[in-house]
Image (cartoon, helix red, strand yellow):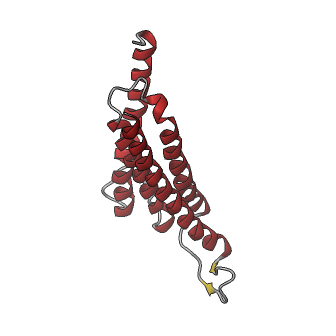
Amino acid sequence: MKNDILKHQRFLVIHGTLILLTGFIIGFGFLFFITGNISLWPIPGKIDYQMPGRYDAWRMAHMEGIINGLMLWLIAALLPVFATFVKNLKWLVILPPVISWSIVIGASFDPLFPDARGLVFDATTNLMNDISFFVFFPGVFLCFVLVIGILVSAWKHSRNPS
């Protein structure tokens, strides 16, 4: 059982780290958007280019990567606690990375494409918004499934801890 938990923790930490790195890379896009040019000190020179998008969209995409990556690390750290009341840890290990990647990828559409927040589906106006919506939707739905599943498992265990 302990080896399984360690294997699951490594899986979550790897995905959390990849998602954090994605957030960091998006952060460079955010930096280039704010400064209106592409330059990386100490590399000499700069390219005058205004990244597309809006300030809020870049900030949100950047923060989604950081928050979701850290959340996977937190779940990995808490996995031994979850193992005391969750009967099958596999769903608790597989769902969070799926949710996180869905949200981070979905949030990345908005800074790059006009009005592609993915909050609603509207087949008549914006294809990139609709793609973003269908990338986000599974993550949002599965997030509710995951949290409710944890709550139900914890509740059942608190009423009958054996």
Examine the rendering and report whether any part of residue 64 can be seen: yes
Quadrant of the image occupied by residue 93:
top left
- Identity of the residue drawn at 57% across and 54% down: 63
Residue nearer the viewer, 51 or 31: 31
The number of numbered badges drawn on the structure is 0
| Quadrant housing residue 88 | top left
Q: Residue at x 43, y 53 (%)?
A: 15
Q: Nearer the viewer, residue 160 or 40?
A: 160
Name the quadrant of the N terminus: top left
**Residue at 50% across / 62% down in the picture?**
22
Placement of the C terminus among the 4 image quadrants: top left
At x 35%, y 56%, the residue is 130
* Placement of 49 over or under 94, stated as above or below: below
Decide if residue 120 is in sight here.
Answer: no
**Furthest residue toward bottom:** 45
Q: Position of residue 112 (x, y in %)?
A: 48, 68
User: Quick check: 48 left or right of 14?
Assistant: right
